[in-house]
Amino acid sequence: MSGVWIISENRRQSMEILNIGQQLADKMGTRVSALLYQNREHVEDCINHGADEVMLLPPLSSEQPLESHIPVIIEEARKGEPDLILLPATPRGKNMAALIAARLNVGLVSSCTKIDFNEESKTLVMERLSHGGAAVQKVICTASPAMATIPPRTYETAMPETGRQGNVRDLPPPPASAIKVIERKLKERETKDISEARVVVCVGRGIEKEEDLAIARQFAEVVGGAIGCTRPIAEEFHWLPEELCIGLSGVQIKPDLYFGIGVSGQIQHVTGIRNAKVIAAVNKDDNAPIFKAADFGIIGDLYDVMPKLISELKK
Ligand SMILES: Cc1cc2nc3c(=O)[nH]c(=O)nc-3n(C[C@H](O)[C@H](O)[C@H](O)COP(=O)(O)OP(=O)(O)OC[C@H]3O[C@@H](n4cnc5c(N)ncnc54)[C@H](O)[C@@H]3O)c2cc1C
């Protein structure tokens, strides 16, 4: 076995993926290598959290896209022959993963929610949602390296162990690329990234008018949560941006608390919240499917319930 690689953009993702990477490496009898984009300050952290080796990609100029690193990563992968490469299922991680998998001519398990190593058959078994979240697909990777992207917060942060030793290796700069970045613009965001939020307040079609989003915003402020929404709110009404849509065609979230306001709880939506630690919902229909998924439910009119909840929580 020649190793588990993790390729990540920031500290939090590295620590989460190192957790599963190290567990798998232990079972596989191999070591963990972390490949970082110029984050020299995270090297020690990565080693203390389970990396046996850190490979550092050099800084890029403002004209070079992140994808410029691909040829160097491919060359290292061909030389190092890792058994498994893990990346975060973030927009950037998914893009890099697809490019790497295509060039290595291997499969890629996207948005993988569970990975295990079967010590008898010596195979990696991965799970991901399929059929609109109604089924779990089990995938056994036969090509090497196996590759997967893992949604943020699927795994807890690895436990640190101070004084661990590891190698640090600087990788070469990227070769000249035909692609040149002319301008970078930050995408305007309604709120912070909801896939990383600990509390998510989700707005559904039970909210009657756009102005009434204020109710959800007030509640979110009181509970320190980020706003999310169902697909109709983003795609039909355009009251909130599509990046806040939760579910099959939106983001998968894993907060400590999900609070649905006027959300019916159709399977395509619930698929995105099933990993929340606690699910709570307010809905006036006691037969709403959200109550089957919920740990706590309030049956009532949101226009009556929410102001009361907000004022109680403010106390
Ligand atoms: C291929 C596919 C992909 C999809 N992907 C997604 C996805 O990623 N995310 C997603 O969300 N949906 C997705 N959908 C749509 C999904 O099937 C549902 O239509 C959608 O989630 C419903 O949104 P909703 O709960 O806001 O609205 P509704 O289903 O209309 O539910 C509104 C709820 O509000 C309640 N309500 C109404 N008034 C009040 C009130 N005053 N007080 C309290 N409760 C009230 C009602 O009882 C009802 O349960 C997808 C559908 C398809 C076919």
Image: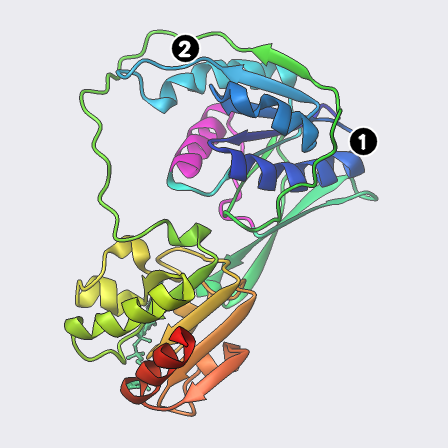
Determine which of the numbered discs, if any, sits on residue 29 in the image.
1
**Picture layout, residue 246 above or below residue 289:** above
Q: In percent of the image, x 31 and y 57: which residue is there?
A: 244
The residue type indicated by label 1 comes to Gly
Determine which of the numbered discs, if any, sits on residue 174 in the image.
2
Determine which of the numbered discs, if any, sits on residue 191 in the image.
none
Main SS category, magenta section: helix
| The N terminus - image quarter | top right
CA–CA distance between discs 2 and 1?
Answer: 32 Å
Name the one closer to the observer, 3 or 274: 274
Callout 1: few (<14), some (14-19), or many (20+) C-alpha neighbours within 10 Å?
few
From the viewer's perspective, is 213 left or right of 299?
left
Does dot 1 land on a helix, a strand or a loop? Answer: loop
Q: Find the magenta span and give its range.
A: 92-112
The residue type indicated by label 2 comes to Pro
Give the quarter the ligand 1 occupies.
bottom left
Name the one closer to the observer, 261 or 113: 261
